[in-house]
Amino acid sequence: MRKLLSLILCAAMLLTVCVSSTAESTKTPMTPGTYTSAQKGQNDFVTVAVTVSENAIEKVEVVSHQETPGIGAPLTEAGLEGDTPIATLPQKIVDAQSYGVDAVAGATITSYAIKNAVKDALAQAGANTDEWKAAPEKAAPEAKELTADVVVLGAGGAGLASAISALENGAESVILVEKCGAVGGDTLVCGAIYNTPDEALQSVETLSEAKRATIEGVLAKEPASEEQAKLIETVKAELAAYDEAGRTDIFDSAAWFALQTWDGGDYVANPALVEVLTGKAKEGYDWICNMGLEFYPVIGQGAGSLWQRTHTTTKTMGTGFITTYVNKLAEYGDKVTVLTYTTAKTLIKAEDGTITGATAEDKAGNTYTLHANKGVVLSTGGFAANGKMAQQYNTSGKWDDLSKVKTTNRWACSQGDGITMAAEAGASLTDMDQIQLLYLGNLVDGQLTKYPKRVVSGTDQEIFINKEGNRFVQEDGRRDQICLASLKQTDGYFFFLESGDGTYEDLDTAISADGFTLRFLEEQGYIYVGETLDELAEKLNAAYGCTMTGEGLQATVDAFNTCVENGADPEFGRTLFTTKLTKGPWVATPRQACLHHTMGGVTIDTEGHVLDVNGNIMPGLVAAGEVTGGIHGGNRLGGNAVVDTVVFGKLAGETVTK
């Protein structure tokens, strides 16, 4: 069966499907031939060639595209990730003899680009397009029952990690339930950064005086709890040993990572969960590396991560994580069942309170009763794409109305339905009012896409400027503080400003974080480039109504370069200085603050068990990823979400199989 599935998918990835038709047709005759149409997709135009006879669609071929792997386009050839429109819609259209086939869930923009291109090509051929839009007939819905050792609800990064971990720890079968057309969730569109202490990479960097002051500032705080006091004493002892050894490299440890994560979240999080996250981060990193995931061999400081412990994958966005997981799951063959287009509805609870499975429904109306011999993993994500839910829980006083704010998340993935489902079954919720915005959303749709790599992993080589051309915030500071400051700027957005200094790559060869050349981003209006600051100011003024001048920008840059020379930023408190900005080309990337991560969710203990409203373990139910609360507190550090999916995903798989 798996071999057959693989052959089908391989055929689909050739993007060519042929059919012959001898049946009589009452449709308006077409002029035989091949017709081409290009329609706007998620990223760029999708070009489709359609070959027709007088009365049939003979062949549909996607001849060019730049759609996102794993969402609009194929990710792997393993046959487990599910449906992507570039791979499968051509075949569906030919088989149905209709462009009225269903769009792929989670990839509707790419789907409609293909469907509209086929419609346009048929019109070119002289067809009455209304005659080719009928939706294919669907089979009557069925009620189905399936059983596995472990049922995983939600197949993003945390769900896939938990499925692999469960299989490694003795589960003989796993069912993965995913409401989108393909697995991956929001992990597919993450910044691909992972935080962990790494002595080998940190040893070649130098601890600056400003960074040293950061440590001492946190250690000088008056402890508000016994846990905080204990962590502070541990880090003090580690720092003393570091000094005694005469070291000057980047200081780090699991304890300092924990203290900084807890401090960066305003001590709202559960410290025990924080210590699991940070204490197992290196173990999780080694685990995914051993599966084949590759990272660049350098350490950095990701956007909002606050420390130089960030690792960046070599693949675009989060595709490296999902590709690695899918390929690993494929090794388990028929032990893995993936149900895409399927939404979990309720948790099944036995009379003694044990969670024994879940009910679900797919897009065809088929209903499922899923029985779990060992337990259920809840990994359905957060609610940052649900503006109504975000505003419902927006009670911390930090943010204004969030109901209309754009999101960096995939709309279909982060609706909070798993949190609601768990609460209905009796689960308690933690930190639901803790909501994070991120300042990396593009101005078109708010997505975390189409930006130079240094925007996320090269904070040391850029500054943030407003429409007046002035710095306004500490660029290496907390995400919430940067977002609050950016929202106060004229029109609520700002620009990343980079120069040709540092780890600069040529615009024609450099690739963005999501796989585009910087020249393409310039052509599409996602970045603006000037050989001089005068030229850049003119372009930004024309495009956005800014009031910049080249002279004003130069004054801003000169003031920053003085901070680099002195290793201190008296106005904003920046601590990261490696690169002066001195030469062109100058690159400006417009960005805005968008809903990004919800730190609240179901309550868990340090083994991932879900707790009920009385604080008791709900037998048979564990959770991992953004669906959980208590890990990040009031402000999640950049790069820690991926650590969360790996560490707690792996832990959930271990716990559910005990």
Image: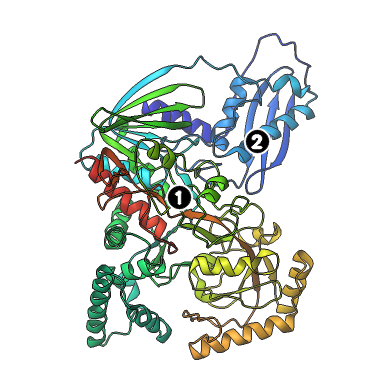
Q: Where is 525 relative to 44, above or below?
A: below
Q: Position of residue 487 (x, y in %)?
A: 62, 65
Label 2: which secondary element: helix
Q: Give the quarter of the figure containing the C terminus.
A: top left
Q: Give the quarter of the figure containing the N terminus.
A: top left
Q: Position of residue 412 (x, y in %)?
A: 53, 41
What's the CA distance linking mark 2 and mark 1? Answer: 23 Å
Label 1: which secondary element: helix
Residue placed most toward the observer, 573 or 630:
630
Q: Residues within 10 Å of mark 2 (few under 14, many from 20)?
A: many
Q: Amino acid at mark 1?
A: Thr
Q: Amino acid at mark 2?
A: Tyr
Tell me the residue at 44%/29% (across/down). 7
Residue placed most toward the observer, 454 or 573:
573
Read off the residue under disc 2. Answer: 112
Disc number lying in front (2 or 1): 1
Q: Position of residue 584 (x, y in %)?
A: 65, 77
Tell me the residue at 53%/50% (across/down). 390
The mark that comes first in sequence, 2 or 1, is 2
Colouring chosen for the image of the structure: rainbow
